Amino acid sequence: MLETIEVPRPEPRAGHVVVRLGATSVNPVDCKLRSGAVTFLGEPPFTLGFDLSGTVVDVGDGVTEFRSGDEVFGMVHSRTGTYSEYVLARAGSLAPRPANVDHHTAAALPTAALTARQALDLAKVVAGERVLIHAAAGGVGHLAVQLAVLRGARVICTARAANHEFLRDLGADEVIDYTATDFTTAVRDVDVVLDLVGGDYGSRSLRVLRPDGRYVTAQQSDAGEDPRVALVTGAPSPAQLAEIGELVGAGRVRVHIDQAIPLAQAGKAHELSESGRVRGKLVLTPW
Ligand SMILES: NC(=O)c1ccc[n+]([C@@H]2O[C@H](COP(=O)([O-])OP(=O)(O)OC[C@H]3O[C@@H](n4cnc5c(N)ncnc54)[C@H](OP(=O)(O)O)[C@@H]3O)[C@@H](O)[C@H]2O)c1
């Protein structure tokens, strides 16, 4: 259950800053934590949210990276999450927000872009390789498509027909409508699969992978013990986030915001996320 409550503004702990929220964003894991499908934050009540963009308003002891007034974005993993007007964040998990990247765009990035980037790193994607991306139109997927294209990969996507033009605009070479065509009949011998769906997409993906290919999944799947299989867990990395922020600021990576919704309507945002039909990212705003 989601509930809006009044709490005191957090005090800055050592190594932490307090950030006034500019925007946060919804990740599917937020909905899974709300429903109890995943429990890694412990027993409720806790504040949801991992992504933030905002302004530093208080600095704890030992923080040298930031001062009050600095614009930052990043990933916060704690029970005092980012669906909040003021957020306590570890200074070491934040990066400076580029001046030409607005709060909505910056808040959409941390979990999705870091997961996309770290998945491509894990798969060691290099120029010329064919990369199949499942759920390419979503938050992680649409960024993974662009980051893979920047590495010189040829990108094949699974998505509904309504998202094909969107994905081709982002640089996808081929798009498979998974509602009409079984991808295992449409593609073969790919170098890398990035699976953002999971379940039986695991074993099916292994069937279209080269013998020396790599399958990286962000979701539990039935791919089993195959040595080509790896699970990615998006982790905070201010250095990688700063690089991604620069790419976005330079217009080399585009962030698609499906909708920006006030935090007070987070329940509506969760319903949309759980529909599985969000294109790009859902952003939450504090006003
Ligand atoms: N392990 C980690 O650290 C980590 C980090 C981030 C995310 N994840 C997980 O990765 C998954 C994707 O995250 P996300 O934020 O990108 O989710 P998302 O934004 O909610 O993904 C929505 C997209 O999924 C697509 N989709 C749904 N079912 C599909 C299917 N069967 N085949 C192809 N596309 C499908 C939809 O496109 P269409 O409308 O075209 O179907 C929609 O655009 C989630 O399960 C999330 O929990 C894991």
Image: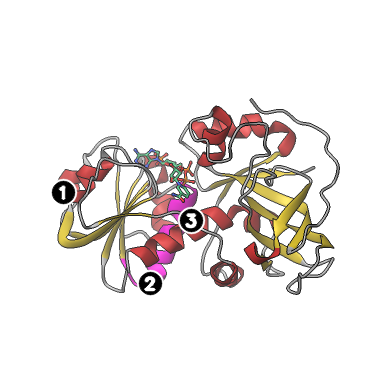
Instruction: Name the mark on residue 234.
Output: 3
Mark 3 residue CB less than 8 A from any atom of ligand 1 = yes
Query: Is disc 2's CB within 8 Å of ligand 1?
Result: no
Q: Amino acid at mark 3?
A: Gly
Q: Which residues are magenta?
A: 138-153
Residue 250, percent across and down? 58, 73
Q: Nearer the viewer, mark 1 or mark 2?
A: 1
Position of 231 relative to 41 (above/below): below
> Which label was assigned to residue 207?
1
Residue 123 showing in the rendered view = yes
Label 3 crowd bin: few (<14), some (14–19), many (20+), radius 10 Å:
some
Task: Find residue 151 and name its label.
Answer: 2
The furthest residue to the top:
1
- What SS does tag 2 mark? loop
Closer mark to the observer between disc 3 and disc 1: 3
Residue 169 against residue 159 in the figure, above or below = below
Closer to the N terminus: mark 3 or mark 1?
Answer: 1
Q: Secondary structure at mark 3?
A: loop
Magenta run includes residue 146 = yes
Q: Which mark is residue 124?
A: none
